[in-house]
Image (cartoon, grey):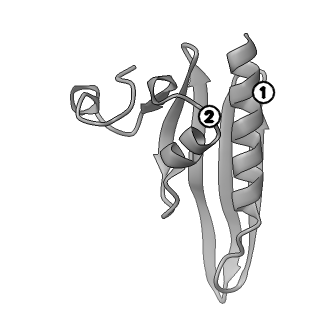
Amino acid sequence: MESIIKFRDVIKQLLTEYSQYHYRYGKVESQVIFDTEHDHYQLVRVGWEDKKRVYGCVLHLDIKDEKIWIQWNSSDIDIGKALVAHNISKDDIVLGFHPEHLRQYSEYAIS
């Protein structure tokens, strides 16, 4: 349970930090979504760039099976390296956006 609490704290810290990076144009807001009951965490951008609607998930992480699952990363941030820099073991990180049969080639956990 102690590791889950640490995972939550690190994920919240990183997503909050990344939410401070401003979108390049328009009136676009960064929103952090923390569902600590079900352990789903997201950074979402929402707003308008001129007359174009901007909406999308930038980062999505889950905690499941006592590991951090990186479900989506549409940023140039290497969130895996950021987690490791916060003393999260690579064995506790799963690249959920990769098919299971390819995860063995990453430096992170398979599942």
The residue at which mark 1 appears reads as 36
In this view, the residue in front, 100 or 104, is 104
- The residue drawn where x is 59% and y is 44% is 85
The image quadrant where one finds the C terminus is top left
Q: Determine crowd level at label 2: few under 14, some 14-19, many 20+ residues with C-alpha closer than 10 A.
A: few
Residue reaching furthest to the bottom: 50
Q: What amino acid is labelled 1 in the image?
A: Thr
Residue 28 percent location from the top left of the image? 72, 74
Q: Is residue 84 above or below residue 67?
A: below
Q: Residues within 10 Å of mark 1 (few under 14, many from 20)?
A: few
- Mark seen at residue 74: none
- Identify the mark nearer the N-term, 2 or 1: 1
Q: How many labels, in total?
A: 2
Q: Are marks 2 and 1 in contact (CB under 8 Å)?
A: no
Give the x, y percent position of residue 105.
Answer: 23, 34
Q: Residue furthest top?
A: 1
The location of residue 45, given as percent across then percent down, is: 67, 63
In this rendering, the label closer to the viewer, 2 or 1: 2
93 relative to 49 in the view: left or right: left
Residue at 49%, 38% in the rendered image: 71
Quarter that holds the N terminus: top right
User: Which residue type carries mark 2?
Assistant: Asn
Camera-nearest residue between 101 and 25: 101
**Secondary element at image label 2:** loop
106 left or right of 15 in image: left
Mark 2, residue position = 87
Residue at image location 49% in from the left, 54% down from the top: 78
